[in-house]
Image (cartoon, grey):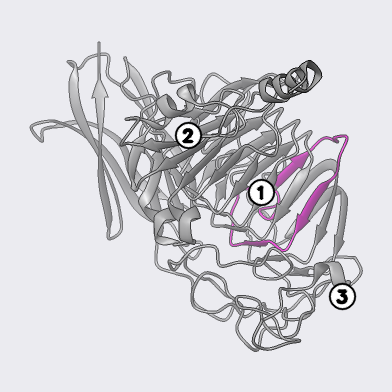
Amino acid sequence: MNRVKLILIFLFAVNLPAIALIRNVPSQYSTIQSAINASSHHDTILVQPGTYFENINFRGKNIVLTSRYYVNNDYSFIHTTIINGSTPQFPDTGSCVIISGNEDSTAVLQGFSITGGTGTKWMDEHGAGLYREGGGVLIQYARPVIQHNIIHGNQTPSGGVSSTGGGGIRIGDSYPRFYNNVVTNNTGRYGAGIVLNYTGGEYRNNIVYKNYGSLEFGAGSGLWINGSFSRPVLVENNTIVFNTALSGTAGVYSLGAPATLRNNIVWGNTAGSSVQISGSGLTVRYCNVQGGFSGAGNINVEPMFDSSNYYLRSSSPCIDKGDSSIVYNDPQDPGNPGQAKWPSRGTLRNDMGAYGGPFSSVIANTTVGVNSNQQALNPESIILFQNYPNPFNPKTIIGYTLSDLNDRSIFVSLKIYDALGKQSAVLVNEHKSPGSYEAEFDGSGFPSGVYLYVLKAGNFSETKRMMLLK
């Protein structure tokens, strides 16, 4: 073999990427973060079922972080592989997952339940001040794929910041692909479900429901959009329903950000008014919007959800009513040419909502709960959040949400007990209307130790633990 050939072989070999590895948690690495720290670009971190009390950071690595869901699309692994961010090492960094190091589209987060996060104090890059955002997931300067996750029960508590938003997920100055996720039961003063701040991205086939906002910046409890980016915001085939806010608009709100909404269902969101979509900069087409909205192909008809997971009934007016362009077609049923593959329905023309279009897929195998104007509201839906910070010294915040109370008030008590069950303090003892609340506990006069806090509201009662550490 001549010298030229040897040189070419050497140059080819040294430029080959390192062999991508599968790093297993917990068999090889006890924590998800330790596996990330050990990983190189293009590695896969495979996480077995369990609850991982962690606040993880991709640290600029283009890796695939996944549960066993990816092996055979077994949806049970999404529900049983949990990233719980309720015990952050640093209280100001309480997001469950942070992706903020210029990760590209080969960085993937998929197949997890993401819960318990309290967001991260984040200095706004555009000069607006200090905010706490991204309770579940915080993305900045990145282009990851976020798919098939359930982002639920996260919050962005107030205190020491200008405001709080993106209880479920906050995305800024980025271009992610956000597909087939469930975003529910998250809280924030604005954008309780999703915040898009000076960002682009593709947001397709997600269910965003029952997120609870407060009263700032138009609220936008389902989806809140602000600022323009070099690439567009595309919001296609999502179901954005039954989110609430104390004022403003509970469905979709834009502060002048250019965004296209196509083939969505925006219904049953309630705030200071019954308006589902408001703000400026929005192009809305082929959407079912309660109360109506100007735009080609838009309708205003009860969507007729099935009894679980916001599937469409066979008689739903949203079937075959999305954009008729072929690029938006539902997948074809291999055994029935010309007909859509489940969970889409009807013919190949796009179905409005999360189960229509080329990205149509079953999202979760559990009942997520359905409201409809043809149904009575569900019984009280009450959430008690983990206190923040925890451990604490001497003060901590306890958040809770009251929703689906048919606009009535309910008697609420929130009490603190020591480890022996002796009552230490009463934080709330009064009637409360539906909404999101926070109560502060000051442990200055109490000894270090474990304390219990108990929320009672009607027939609801829940107890959580916290630690005072002096």
Crowd rating for badge 1 (residues with CA inside 10 Å; few <14, some 14–19, many 20+): many
- Residue 324, disc: 3
- In percent of the image, x 47 and y 22: which residue is there? 37
Query: Pointer 3 and pointer 2: residues touching (CB < 8 Å)?
Result: no
For disc 1, the marked residue is 178
Under circle 1, the secondary element is: strand
Taking the view exactly as shown, the residue that stands out farthest to the left is 420
* Amino acid type of the residue that numbered disc 2 sits on in the rendered structure: Cys
Crowd rating for badge 2 (residues with CA inside 10 Å; few <14, some 14–19, many 20+): many
Q: Would you say 352 lies left or right of 179 here?
A: right
Under circle 2, the secondary element is: loop
- Residue 209, disc: none
Residue interval drawn in magenta:
224-251
- Residue 96, disc: 2
Quadrant for residue 201, please give it.
top right
The answer to whether residue 283 is above or below residue 322 is: above
- Residue 180 on image: x %, y %: 61, 57
The answer to whether residue 60 is above or below residue 259 is: above
Crowd rating for badge 3 (residues with CA inside 10 Å; few <14, some 14–19, many 20+): some
Q: Is residue 399 magenta?
A: no
- Residue 429 on image: x %, y %: 31, 42
234 or 43, which lies in front?
Answer: 43
Taking the view exactly as shown, the residue that stands out farthest to the right is 296
- In percent of the image, x 43 and y 51: which residue is there? 68
Query: Pointer 1 and pointer 3: residues touching (CB < 8 Å)?
Result: no
* Residue 399 visible in image: no
Under circle 3, the secondary element is: loop
Instruction: Give the alpha-carbon distance from disc 1 to disc 2, as whole Å.
Output: 17 Å
